[in-house]
Image (cartoon, rainbow, N blue to C red):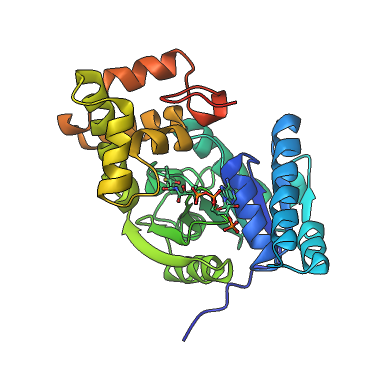
Amino acid sequence: MSVAHGIKLLGVLGAGQMGTGIAFVSALRAKVPVLIHDRSQEQITKGLALMDKLLAKDVSKGKLQAAEAQEARDRVRIVDSLDAMRDVDMIIEAVTENMDLKRTLFKSFAETLRPDAILATNTSSISITKIAAAVIPSGKTAASKEGKEAAGRVVGLHFFNPVPVMKLVELISAIQTTPDTLDRARAFAEACGKEVTTSQDVPGFVSNALLMPFINEAIMCLEKGTATRDDIDKTFRLGMNHPMGPLQLADFIGLDTCLSIQQTLYTGTSDSKYRPSVLLERMVDAQWLGRKSGKGFYEYD
Ligand code: CAA
């Protein structure tokens, strides 16, 4: 029997492409009111403009009634602080891939939000178990009732980009996550129209433990001159029917994100097979971050 997610109000922290996409599917598909916060006004403006564009496109294609689009848009409200999210039933964090930043944020979630709110992270590789350990109340141990209850509410909900299009959410359990948190997080992802797979909390989970070494190897192929950029990508588009070749996909994900995931795999396993490609490191040093910065393996307007 499926479990009710019980989410009547959702918070989304971070209005980049992932946070915006998560807010979009939550408001449109799960029909849940969403409060979204980002410290960058520019990011918020861009995120809302993207949402308006996607809704308008679905209306113009006849996939959505104008009234439904308006209702979805009205469900999304911008707030200017975490304090304004204190009544949410679940928060989904979608900020940059930085362990210290995420641990600091989760500590403040635990201090600010309701004690029964689910605390989810959209991280694509960072240990959910380490993030969960950050929410234990000061003065309490991990083994105390309060410590277990707090950490038990933390879960990984890994969406894929572009969130409105990709059908999957990867559900990751920290070793502290309770079965109730997992069941409700799964039910929420399903209400957003997603299929759910589960992964243990290992570096990169299933998706990026497999995808990033593939992308990294493709970059090494380019670095060694094994083939040209276009032939590497064409091999996978035409030879394996991938929608994008690995270099194009790396640009799409963001080279900084690819590098940080690859570094998490490398440091998390101490296995030299995960060493990031020097070319990837240099490109990130140069701020050639892919599509979002206008230049990566390809150039963008
Ligand atoms: N946001 C929302 N919708 C988008 C979109 C975006 N950024 N980009 C494209 N779409 C929609 C289009 O509007 C279109 O929708 P309709 O069918 O309703 O018109 C549909 O997607 C197809 O778009 P296009 O026809 O313009 O282009 P396409 O057929 O080339 O598809 C693509 C674009 C869906 C991005 C496709 O190239 C693709 O699937 N690429 C691979 C994406 C992928 O692998 N994502 C996972 C990255 S890994 C990750 O996210 C996790 C991580 O941890 C790093």
Residue found 21% across the figure and 37% down from its top = 269
Q: Is residue 280 visible?
A: yes
Residue found 47% across the figure and 37% down from its top = 252
Quadrant of residue 17 within the rendered picture: top right
Residue found 75% across the figure and 50% down from its top = 52
User: Who is closer to the viewer here, 197 or 241?
Assistant: 241
How far across and how far down the image is residue 166, in percent?
49, 57
Above/below status of 18 relative to 56:
above
Left or right of residue 78, residue 185 in this image: left
Most distant residue in the bottom direction: 1
How far across and how far down the image is residue 138, in percent?
53, 42
Quadrant of residue 74 within the rendered picture: bottom right
How far across and how far down the image is residue 246, in percent?
33, 38
Left or right of residue 10, residue 148 in this image: left
Q: Is residue 89 visible?
A: no
How far across and how far down the image is residue 278, in percent?
28, 18
Residue found 27% across the figure and 33% down from its top = 232
Above/below status of 179 relative to 287:
below
Count how many numbered circles sit on residues in the image: 0
User: Who is closer to the viewer here, 197 or 161?
Assistant: 161
User: Who is closer to the viewer here, 39 or 100?
Assistant: 39
Left or right of residue 33, residue 273 in this image: left
Q: Quadrant of the C terminus?
A: top right
